[in-house]
Image (cartoon, helix red, strand yellow):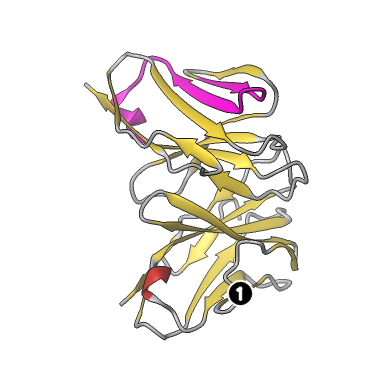
Amino acid sequence: QKEVEQNSGPLSVPEGAIASLNCTYSDRGSQSFFWYRQYSGKSPELIMSIYSNGDKEDGRFTAQLNKASQYVSLLIRDSQPSDSATYLCAVGYGSSNTGKLIFGQGTTLQVKP
Amino acid sequence: GEEVAQTPKHLVRGEGQKAKLYCAPIKGHSYVFWYQQVLKNEFKFLISFQNENVFDETGMPKERFSAKCLPNSPCSLEIQATKLEDSAVYFCASSQSLGQETQYFGPGTRLLVL
């Protein structure tokens, strides 16, 4: 079992729809969770970070964290073609906080006009 | 600077040759991280530094990989005797501190081993 798992997709949604991206992790001691967006050939760019159970909203993006279920999700409302990219879930490794991030394999999102 | 800088952008080496990659973190950031991205999406943590001190090297293949962060110099990642499977994009990231602190990624160095 991988430490951080994502459905690789592609996830295809029409423009204006809600895109839902999911991630599960195996280490119960993890305390920090991040969603990065990566366009092809570019470096990862932080979209959201979340540290406490519940929802965190920033513009069109909402991150959801459920530590009991070891589950993190990212919702993108009013999806735009420019949102088409690979979304990487990253988890801060363990409870000892070394800063090391463990990444999922990424979910490719395609937003169709 | 305001961005993480990495050089070179591209590096081509024959199998068995040495490769050296450089990273300048954002000014004021104390932590530097190196990640390897193989096959487009598989990110692997290699090593982290707190200033010039190795902080976590649990991801480093120690027999051929080494890294340094020296005062007043860019950090470096060196691969001795490169192998085909070392072909990847190597990303450097930096952060001000640990924990609830964003890691900002550089543009990456694309290494191709032939």
Query: Where residue B4 sits in the image (x, y, percent)?
Result: 56, 55
Who's the residue at 41% across and 77% down the image? B83
Q: Vertically, is A51 above or below A27?
A: above
Secondary element under disc 1, as helix, strand or loop, is loop
Farthest residue toward the left?
A113
Q: Residues within 10 Å of mark 1 (few under 14, many from 20)?
A: few
Give the percent coordinates (x, y) of residue B89: 42, 60
Please tell me whether residue A60 belongs to the stretch shown in magenta. no
Quarter holding residue A18: top left
Numbered circles on residues, count: 1
The answer to whether A74 appears left or right of B11 in the picture is right
Task: Write down the chain letter for disc 1.
Answer: B
Q: Is residue A66 magenta?
A: yes
Q: Split into 4 quadrants, where in the image is the C terminus of chain B?
A: bottom left
Q: Which residues are magenta?
A: A62-86
Using the image, determine if residue A64 lies above or below residue B112. above
Relative to A106, is B4 on the left or the right?
right
- Is B108 drawn above or below residue B100 in the view shown? below
Residue at image coords 36%, 55% = B39
In the image, taking residue A8 as reference, residue A65 lies left or right, namely right
The front one of A5 and B86 is A5
Quadrant of image for the N terminus of chain B: bottom right
Q: Which residue is mark 1?
A: B62
Residue at x 56%, y 43% (from the top left corner): A3
Give coordinates of residue B21: x percent, y percent: 51, 72
Q: The disc labelled 1 sits on which kind of residue?
A: Lys
Q: Quadrant of residue A28?
A: top right
Q: Point out residue B109 in the picture as x, y percentages from the top left corner.
A: 44, 64
